[in-house]
Amino acid sequence: MRKLLTILVAVLLTASVFAQSPEKMSYQAVIRNSSNQLVTNQTVGMQISILQGSSNGTAMYVERQFPTTNANGLVSIEIGAGTVVSGNFTTIDWANGPYFIKTEIDLNGGANYTITSVSQLLSVPYALHAKTAETVTGTITETDPIFGASVASGITATDTANWNNKLDSYTETDPIFGASVASGITGTDTTNWNNKQDQLIAGTNITIVGNTISATGGGASNDFYLGQDTLGGIVFYIYLDANGNQHGLIVSKTETTAQWQSTTSTTDATRSWDGVYNMNLMTNSPAKTWVTSLGADWYLPSIDELSILWHNRFHANKGLNDVGATLLSSTADYWSSTEYNATRAFTFAFNSGIAYYNVKTNTCSVRAVRAF
């Protein structure tokens, strides 16, 4: 029998770590003839058998291939990719070895094999051996000493059930709190508290002593007088109450022109003597908007208050002139806050001293007053 020198290499072909095993082994052999000459560039017939147990053991798998040698007499094949003669390469239990590879060669490229070689697989291809993990059965016991010593190893199904059923929310049922004043505090209450007046500052004709706020100006040293520049305007009217305290009216130092109402509607601002009451009812009013821009205490005078201002215009204009402020016009019609009907309100003609009603959407002069 002719001699064959071979070099065997059994390795797993490259594959993704997430892919299945390729079910093949790479195999290489150098072919020589009986004269120990390389058989080059020639098709040969090969039969490959996987034997179990020994070099004469049971053939678990047999296949045939017909490779061509290269210029160095080398053939490279993949066992598992040939024509199957018997067995199933994918079902071999590589853990149940040892295993041997038997190769038979026909140098003429047929199946008349005259060269035979047997080599033991000294290491099972890793991927094929690892493939056995795909069919692991039975019970796997945790023997990790780190896990066994940890708190986690003692967690039971009861523990997880208790955690999943944990209390997510609760309802306040404290009877003591429910009976207290605090239980009735609302969001509005806290908003009002947060917006409280933190401190009061004394100003012109106002004194604060402890928790007592007093108006000054009624005493001998602080008497109001007609034409006086005070509280942002000019005093034009003074009267005494039953206790002898001074009260009166002050006219603003500036004026403007505006509509009584931009869109007419009834407001019921019909008092002839009470400008504060009337202006609080006015809506859609450019005149009101301008007056309120002067400060909280200013208002559009009623028709009677405008009449008093006209009669006392001497003192008003003298005081306005002394401080360089805008004089009352002798020809203007001034809006009062007194309404006549849905479409008209009263104005006072300073050229004639006559009150009459005017269309609310007309533009007339506007002068503010305040009381003390």
Image (cartoon, rainbow, N blue to C red):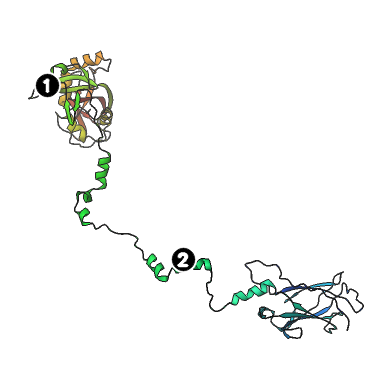
The image quarter in which residue 101 lies: bottom right
Residue 353 visible somewhere in the drawing: no
- On screen, residue 63 versus residue 247, left or right, reads right
Residue at x-position 28% and y-position 40%:
194
In the figure, 222 relative to 14: above or below?
above
Q: Estimate how packed mark 2 is, as few (under 14), some (14 to 19) or many (20 or more) residues with alpha carbons within 10 Å.
A: few
Question: In this figure, what is the number of numbered marks?
Answer: 2
Q: Position of residue 241 (x, y in %)?
A: 9, 24
Quadrant of the rendered image containing residue 200 = top left
| Disc 1 + disc 2, Cβ < 8 Å | no
The quadrant in which the C terminus is found is top left
**Residue 62 sits above or below residue 192 on the image:** below
Residue lying at the far right of the rendered structure: 35
Query: Can residue 253 be seen at all in this image of the molecule?
Result: yes
Amino acid at circle 1:
Tyr
Report the disc number at residue 152.
Answer: 2
Residue type pointed to by label 2? Ala
Q: Rounded to the nearest whole Å, what is the CA distance between mark 1 and mark 2?
A: 90 Å
Q: Earlier in the sequence, mark 1 or mark 2?
A: 2
Question: In terms of depth relative to the viewer, which is nearer, 275 or 47?
Answer: 47
Specify the quadrant that holds the N terminus: bottom right
Q: Position of residue 83 (x, y in %)?
A: 75, 80
Label 1: state its secondary structure.
Answer: strand
Q: Residues within 10 Å of mark 1 (few under 14, many from 20)?
A: few
Q: Is residue 89 above or below residue 292?
A: below
52 or 216, nearer to the observer: 52
Q: Residue at x 42, y 70 (%)?
A: 156
Which label lies toward us, 1 or 2? 2
Q: Is residue 28 above or below residue 282?
A: below
Instruction: Look at mark 1 in the image and give the residue it sits on.
Output: 239
Under circle 2, the secondary element is helix
